Image (spheres, rainbow, N blue to C red):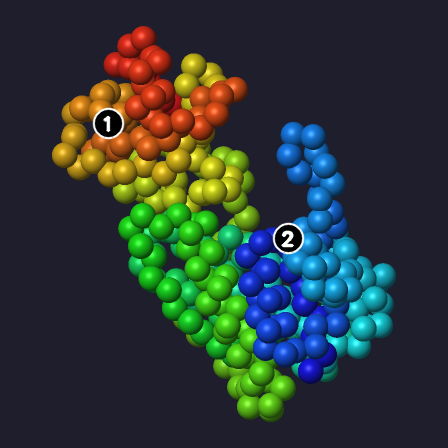
Amino acid sequence: MRVLFAGTPAVAVPSLDALVEAGFDVVAVLTRPDAPVGRKRVLTPSPVAARAAELGIEVIRAARVDAEATARIADVNPDVAAIVAYGGLVPPAALAVPRHGWINLHFSLLPAWRGAAPVQRAVMAGDDVTGAVTFLLEEGLDTGPVFGTLTESVGPEDTAGELLERLSRSGAVLLAQTLSAIGAGKASAQPQAGEVSLAPKLTLEDGHLKWGHPALAISRQARGVTPEPGAWTVLDGQRVKLEPVRLRPDVTTLAPGALALHGKSVLVGTGSHAVELTRIQPAGKKMMAAADWARGMASLESVVFE
């Protein structure tokens, strides 16, 4: 079966590899254009484009699936398109090109967390279980019927990045299985059922920790925005980046945002009990252990995070 693969970030690469390893004829890859990376802003291929080049697969670069991109997709004559985090909408004209349609691997248990940041939003909401599905792409936002499902437990210290990495690998297997079933004429898609929730793309503000919130909510927020866009707070008018915090229910005397040393631990007060900082990146400096940062402060007790 001739497959067009659409994807851009690193989490899509395992799916591309899985389809190639399963013996599918991946005739082309659709991905976002090269983007500037690093301080020198060097134009760099997407992870999917880089992997496709290694595999000798034709690459179609398109910021959006316009008429030109649709024509190039039609030229490679795919039987089906597999899409994993491409980063753009697929209009009706392109949806109609493959005879089996576009099969989307989405990292949530639809209809929960429809949108661009399902894993991040699930972690931030405190979900105990999430997963991935393959579904038939439609014009609506992640509304199509579902072919296959897998579940994944969310650990109490899982970051969105760690959870997404696991799902990208198990989801790759699910995607290959779904395409195999479609090729054999044995696939059956079922309408989505359940409560709908939305997972809009994260913004920088989603990482701003509000110390008046309960400690558990702060922990979930920090884990949900790690690694991107990252958790942060404000100190002396400057943004300070933080890695996920640890819960410290044994300390309840700190005011929200107030800092204190507790043994070798750096604690911050919240709206419930304290949390322990793990690593911190002050403005203009590298990420460092919170204890190392604290040793460089004249008086930690006078420091307050905003």
Q: Residues within 10 Å of mark 2 (few under 14, many from 20)?
A: some
Q: Position of residue 80 (x, y in %)?
A: 69, 77
Three-letter code, disc 1: Ser
Q: Is residue 69 left or right of residue 89?
A: right
Report the disc number at residue 265. 1
Vertical arrangement, residue 91 with respect to residue 263, above or below = below
Q: Tell me the residue at 18%/24% (across/down).
A: 263
Three-letter code, disc 2: Pro
Q: Say which residue label 2 marks.
A: 47
Q: Tell me the residue at 37%/31% (across/down).
A: 279
Quadrant location, the N terminus:
bottom right
Q: Is residue 92 left or right of residue 252?
A: right
Q: Tell me the residue at 27%/38% (across/down).
A: 246
Q: Is residue 140 visible?
A: no
For mark 2, give the secondary structure.
helix
Which of the 4 image quadrants contains residue 5?
bottom right
